Amino acid sequence: MSYENLLYETRGPLALITINRPAKLNAISLGTVDELHVAIAAAADDPAVRVIAITGAGDKAFAAGSDLAEVVHRDLNKALEPIVQGVAERLERCPKPTIAAINGICFGGGLEVALGCDLRVAGRSARFATPEGKLGIIPGGGATQRLPRLVGRAWALDMLLMGEPIDAERALQIGLVTRLVDDADLLATVQRMAEHLASFAPLVPRYMKAMVHAGMEGSLAAGLAMEKFAQAGLCETADKNEGLAAFMEKRPPKWTGR
């Protein structure tokens, strides 16, 4: 499929989705939202793809937020649609690991897309902010809920209420990103991560994601019970037998995804 607002390519086990609106600092238009849904679904359905990454075109921005030219005309009915929140949820529920490769500005809706990813890797030029308060609105793509779950209530409130950018070092310090690399090494780092993740049995990342994302929405007791049932299910797979045999025989495993 051809895209107007994205670039889509596969690099071995990695599907790389690039928001391609550099003239607008990769601001996320409604058309971009629609195409992100299509591209993420395509990558999720491709058996050759094991990991999905999202980045921004150029060196200035991952995504500067929602396209304000469209937000100007957004009314109550349109604002109640999922829009960016729907993209973040699709990323979170995707059965494959998702990575945000963050270059430059990552504000507003761009940050909310990144928050929907399982892993966030930043270049040293990256900057993060939730500036919606300056526009007389609040975030609508999930930041008020995912940010405090990720970095804690104190830092989330600081970012949400103050609306001031934080740099990549601060983002690493508070746990907003987990890896910080030179800008030139960003995509190479994500590629290595994808190849590492692809070395695991296919069901492992899927189960791991489900345990964390779903488990944190309930009680500790419910999460622990769910974990036990999930591990028990994997103990019945051919890949579990293969993994143990390969480890004992000191050879690479040959996964079948069953």
Image (spheres, rainbow, N blue to C red):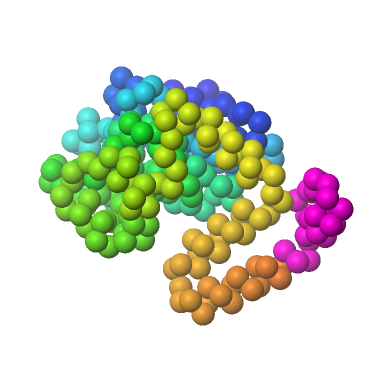
State how many labels appear: 0
Percent from the top left, x then y, of residue 59? 36, 23
Q: Quadrant of the N terminus?
A: top right
Percent from the top left, x then y, of residue 188? 54, 30
In the displayed structure image, the side of residue 2 where residue 156 appears, left or right: left
Furthest-bottom residue in view?
221
Q: Residue at x 53, y 36 (%)?
A: 190
Furthest-top residue in view?
23
Q: Residue at x 69, y 49 (%)?
A: 200
Percent from the top left, x then y, of residue 256? 79, 48
Vertical order, 155 against 49 (above or below) = below
Q: Nearer the viewer, residue 203 or 33?
A: 203
Residue 180 is inside the magenta segment: no
In the displayed structure image, the side of residue 252 where residue 228 appears, left or right: left
> For residue 236, which quarter of the picture?
bottom right
Residue 251 is inside the magenta segment: yes
Is there any visible trace of residue 55 in the rendered image?
A: no
Percent from the top left, x then y, of residue 37? 48, 40
Q: Residue at x 37, y 57 (%)?
A: 150
Q: Residue at x 49, y 42 (%)?
A: 99
Vertical order, 156 against 83 (above or below) = below
Q: Which residues are magenta?
A: 234-258
> For residue 65, which quarter of the picture?
top left
Vertical order, 166 against 220 (above or below) = above
Is there any visible trace of residue 68 in the rendered image?
A: yes
Q: Quadrant of the C terminus?
A: bottom right
In the displayed structure image, the side of residue 38 where residue 256 appears, left or right: right
